[in-house]
Image (tube, rainbow, N blue to C red):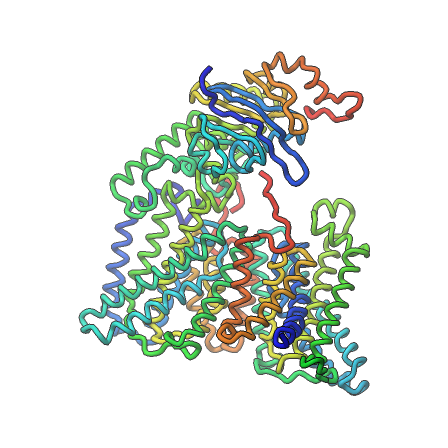
Amino acid sequence: MSQPLLKLDQATIRFGGLTAVSKFNLEVQPCELIGLIGPNGAGKTTAFNMITGVYQPTDGHIHLNGRSIAGVKPHDLTRQGIARTFQNIRLFGSLSVIDNVRAAMQLHCKHGMRAALWRGAIFKSLEKKVEIQAMELLDIFSLGSVRDEEAKSLPYGDQRRLEIVRALATRPKLLLLDEPAAGMNPTEKEELMHLIRFIKDKFQIAVMLVEHDMTVVMGICERIAVLEYGIKIAEGSPQFIQRDPKVIAAYLGTETEKEEPANA
Amino acid sequence: MSSPLSPATPTCAGAKRWLIAGIILAVVVSQFSAQFNRYHLGILVDIGINIILAVSLNLINGHTGQFSLGHAGFMAVGGYTAAKISLVASPMLPPALQPVIFLVALLAGGGLSAMTGLAVGVPSLRLRGDYLAIVTLGFGEIIRVVVQNMESVGAASGLKGIPKYTSLGWTFALAAITIYFVTALVNSTYGRGFIAVSDDEVAASSMGINPVRYKVTAFVTGAFFAGIAGGLYAHHKQFLSPTGFDFLKSIDIVVMVILGGMGRTAGVVVAAILLTLLPEVLRQFSEYRMIIYSLLIIVLMMARPQGLFTWKRKKGGAA
Amino acid sequence: MDWLLQQLINGLALGSIYALIALGYTMVYGVLRFINFAHADVLMLGAYAAYFIAPAVSTVLPLPSLTGTLIIVLLSAMICAGIGMLIEILAYRPLRQRPRLTVLITAIGVSLFIEFTCQHKAVFGADTKPFPQLLPVHDFHLAGLVIGSNDLVVVVTTLLLLVGLWFIVQRTKMGTAMRAVSYNQQAAALMGININRIISFTFGLGSALAAIAGILYALKAPGIDPLMGVQPGLRAFIAAVLGGIGNLPGAALGGLLLGLLETFAGGISGLSNYRDGIAFAILILILLFKPAGLLGKATVEKV
């Protein structure tokens, strides 16, 4: 088997006395669509934050392309190929739609501060190129027509899509989507599923999503990992996960543990 | 950046031409300085200096969304450095070289101020917003105390006899350069990073933008131009005293930025002009002047916290 | 050794005053999350209130006397509590939902407004006024140390007020509500707590403490003027940050520490000229190594 894109090796994170994620082992292969599910508070978003460098694991290791990411800052991890969206949309609200994408593209721009101040011919042609590339991306996700709108004035669904476009603009190898279907109606969810598959095929990247909506997760993921109380209780194909008694117990509650189903 | 005052697409067409035009205009107008009366000339120079201060603070407080309360401190560093250099150098060199001395003095002042900005910014810009306000406020106080105890720059009694180098030409040419610098910087793919950091630091860092680097860049750039403004001020008033750079001066500049609308350079320039003229207009009510001024701050915050020159966009979304 | 002990006593007296003022900053920060710049001016108003009340009281109770002073302090504290609540209702309440920066600048505006209005000749005037002698002064000599009665009064008053405040915050219904509001305003409102009342109460309490601190400060100062609050206010505010802003014991600790450090530094020749800068230098150092302050808890931003 080829080298995994991302490898979590006994990754653990504790906040004071609370172990939010415990000894989490996971491998993500290049160009794979993987889902991370679990009841509320199971540590899914915390795992995301660990992978993106927002939190540092207390114990264990995380490797990206075989290199440890310990101590690497979030912005450097993005450079190395991890991009993400947020559970509660975090766009650059006061920037226009296209500028949200451009801000994400500056990471790969060779022209920085000096070029911006000098404004020579090279700067102008590079800026034009950035604009064209940004528009190409926006057009793929049919956001081209609103390019000059303020991001915060977009309708909810468009904001979610723009966040994905912005993440793609950093040219990731691994895209993390944190509850992309939250607040969507069934039609929108259907569209989202197409979109995610399309992204994976078109950009040839791995996509990992945290999601509560079982239709979405079971519908598109090739592999699923289940977290409960910060511990991975199962991993496998959607069919396998659906039948796993431990997963069913986690979601529906067993006789000893009374818990509300998270998938409301 | 989508106010009616700034283009939605940041191409900044012909910005360099505007800059050159601005500098030429400043130099040409300067030739007719003798025609102005001294009082008006003085106010014009004050306006130019305040434009530099406000536009440079706008890069920190407006575009990058930080909150510095120490701009007067940087102005003091630049002012004292530049004044000291020209005081030492001007008697030693022939009159023809005086403009060179002035340029060197200004750049040295700006440079030292920028270095101070780096020293203050690197540690404190990692902290949350409120704390930066406190640290910069404290920094301003420390500068004041240090200057007050430095005999070589006149200590508490002030630095006198600074040569009068500042002219309309110098002031407005430098104001044009400041405006160009900040506008060109922000209106580029690179520069969108400043606003991204201001909008959402966490999101910015997950988009590959290094927030600390952007904040420090803004802070150091702002400090540099504040230092330049300090140098102009020193060679305009020909006298410096530590009390001239107190907390109130920093507040003045902050109010200009807010009045103009955070992150809106054109608005900030207009605000700098208005707020320089205001005390002159209120001259006959001088005993009520500061009371009116402080009321103005409160009323402004209640009625138009987004600034005087910011309107809602045509389509949805609060401005 | 004597020198050290003497500085310790002076430092404790100064630090106590800082602590009292710092409590007001930290309480307001706790419930509203902003720095109330006008707090320093309430302190000044407290001293002026005492200045104007004293002659009236002295017609009934001859000054200096303890009872007379108590009445003056009580009245001044009440007046300032009212002023503090008024400031909150007029200036801060309309901005409750606005960005914190807006409120911060408003607070600076309010502070400047009070200072400049009071400096006007129709109000207090900018000149320094001699503060009346409220208490009999006596120097206690103890094993080579000189302890001024005023210093003693300052330290004892502060201790009593700290205990009182602790009782209010920890043991009364109002205090519990205050803590709830500080923890989570929305949740507190949903539990039926009247947020406006709690915030008003917090401002009143903080301002009363500031008034008392102002009078104590004036007792030791050569006189009072409309800008007298600025320097102790800044120091106290630093003390609040030093201890961990929003944290009551932290504010008290920060105040005492700052008072001590400043007094010791002031007693060392060469450093004494830089006394005004020392507080800020300490602040910056603390923030670098412990951004949340000495007793504050570091918060992790939820992503």
Q: Which residue is drawn at 42% across and 22% down?
A: A203
Q: Which residue is drawn at 44% across and 65% down?
A: B72
Residues C69 and B314: in front is C69
Quarter of the picture containing the N terminus of chain C is bottom right
Q: Is residue B82 visible?
A: yes
Is C301 situated above or below C204?
above
Determine the image quadrant of residue A217.
top right
Q: Can residue C230 be seen in this view?
A: no
Is B98 situated above or below A108?
below
Determine the image quadrant of residue C3.
bottom right
Give residue C78's position: percent from left, percent from top: 75, 70
The number of numbered badges drawn on the structure is 0
Determine the image quadrant of residue C71.
bottom right
Quarter of the picture containing the C terminus of chain C is top right
**In this picture, residue B278 sits left or right of residue B232:** right
Give residue A77's position: percent from left, percent from top: 46, 34
Give residue B284's position: percent from left, percent from top: 47, 78
Give residue B56's position: percent from left, percent from top: 40, 57
Q: Which residue is drawn at 32% across and 78% down?
A: B161
Residues B19 and B36: in front is B19
**In this picture, residue A185 sits left or right of residue C154:** left
Q: Which residue is drawn at 67% across and 79% down?
A: C145
Is B91 situated above or below A56?
below
Residues A15 and A85: in front is A15
